[in-house]
Image: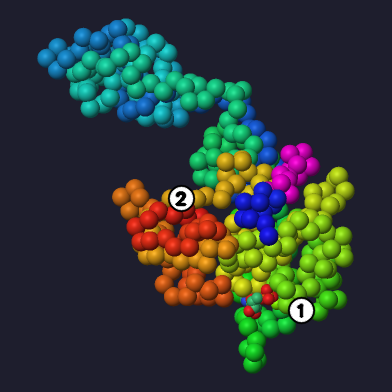
Amino acid sequence: MLSVKEAESIVLNLAQPLDSQRDVETVDLLAASGRILAAAVTGSLDFPYWDNSAMDGYAVRFADVENSSAEKPTVLEVVEDIPAGYQPENTVKSGQAARIFTGAVMPAGADTVVMQEETRREGDRILILVCPEKPQAFVRHKGAFYQAGTTLLTPGTVINAPEMAVLATAQCIQVPVYRRLRAAIFSTGDELVSPDEPLAAGKLVDSNQYALTVLLAQMGLEVVRLGVVPDNEDALKKAIAQAVSTADVVLSTGGVSVGDYDYVEKILADLGGKIHISAVAIKPGKPLTVAQFKRDEKSSDCLYFGLPGNPVSALVCCWRFVVPALRKISGLDADAWGPEFVKARCHAELRSHGKRETYVWGKLHLVAGIWEFEPASGSQNSANLINLANTNGLAVLPPAETWIWPGEFVEVLKVS
Ligand code: AMP
Ligand code: MG
């Protein structure tokens, strides 16, 4: 059976990033929120756009005021008021100053701003009570933060609040982003009903489809839900064929184990899918099945993840293998693919049978700079989706590791 590392490397090799020509769309500025840049953005404006004042105060010539003190203030004539947003009209000559406000354009002739608190106003005159620290004090120079024509943002960057501010500032109102990935999700199993259906004897509510939809939607994917498909070869074949023909990535749950009604892998092969993974030495999650459907050069391949039916197994496989693959395909920078592990101190003992790499779910807290891991109380059973709620970490016990004592450090996969 494949190790987790081997499976991870197979999945990441299959996951090929979207094409930076073919898979790109241009969207309006605000519509770029949460999207991934597909091309470098270069601004055509310096930033700051103009020399401007960083303070409310007086624009002066440094040479005029360098010997100022409270005892021997420099007296200057105020020739103009320059609020933010207006172009100054006068040149500040020796012996003169201009009243200036934060963000207002520096007048010609002045090279320094003296903050208001270090002056005293007397009619049309201003008394400078302190010598500014240096020439250019409190002046924000044109182009000091960014020079026009250089790269502002690189491809693979996610547009969050700071990047949105950068694009707006550069007046980049049409933004090239990667198209959203399309995912198709369905659940398999004769026992499944949807949350709004009556629960007949022996049935179980399909929770996987809801959990996986949220996980992928939160990553920015377009999700098509194909519902519950019964354990019937014809119905499954139809659903899988439909999913594969429309989506970049398909997630199904159930039907990948060794039971009599587990048809998924056989159907994937019948439909021309290349099976790359049939099982992984991971607990929970062993029956993970991964297949690839090749398409012509004009479209990207479809990756199929046949996830185990047990709700915790399905999510663990998603967090460990599917999420990094989707991040890679979506065009994100390599350093953002994850998975993200932290070393954490265990609050309680962790046990494993030692055969497969074992994932124990629980809570990560950062306490005085050290990550602490508290395993979820109650049963660590792959069907127990209840105590998975409010967890945010999966402690990893490598195959030979059977016992972690309280106080020992473990690797924990951060999840959300
Ligand atoms: P399977 O992998 O199909 O053998 O299913 C394994 C276990 O997971 C069984 O107990 C199923 O009832 C349960 N299961 C399968 N699919 C789902 C689902 N969509 N939501 C919740 N539980 C499921
Ligand atoms: Mg089943």
Q: Amino acid at mark 2?
A: Val
Could you classify mark 1 by the number of other residues whose Cα lies within 10 Å: few (under 14), some (14-19), or many (20 or more)? some
Q: Amino acid at mark 1?
A: Tyr
Q: Which residues are magenta?
A: 12-24
In x, y percent, where is residue 57? Answer: 30, 25
Count up the numbered dots.
2
Q: Which residue is mark 1?
A: 261
Mark 1 or mark 2: which comes first in sequence?
1
Q: Determine the residue positioned at 35% across, 61% down.
A: 406
Residue 140 in magenta? no
Q: Determine the residue positioned at 33% across, 28% down.
A: 55
- Quarter of the image with the N terminus is bottom right
Q: Main secondary structure of the magenta part?
A: loop
Q: Determine the residue positioned at 64% across, 92% down.
A: 201
Ligand 1 rendered quadrant: bottom right
- Callout 1: CB less than 8 Å from ligand 2: yes
Q: Nearer the viewer, residue 216 or 134?
A: 216
Instruction: Specify the label residue 342 is tagged with.
Output: 2
Give SS at disc 1. Answer: loop
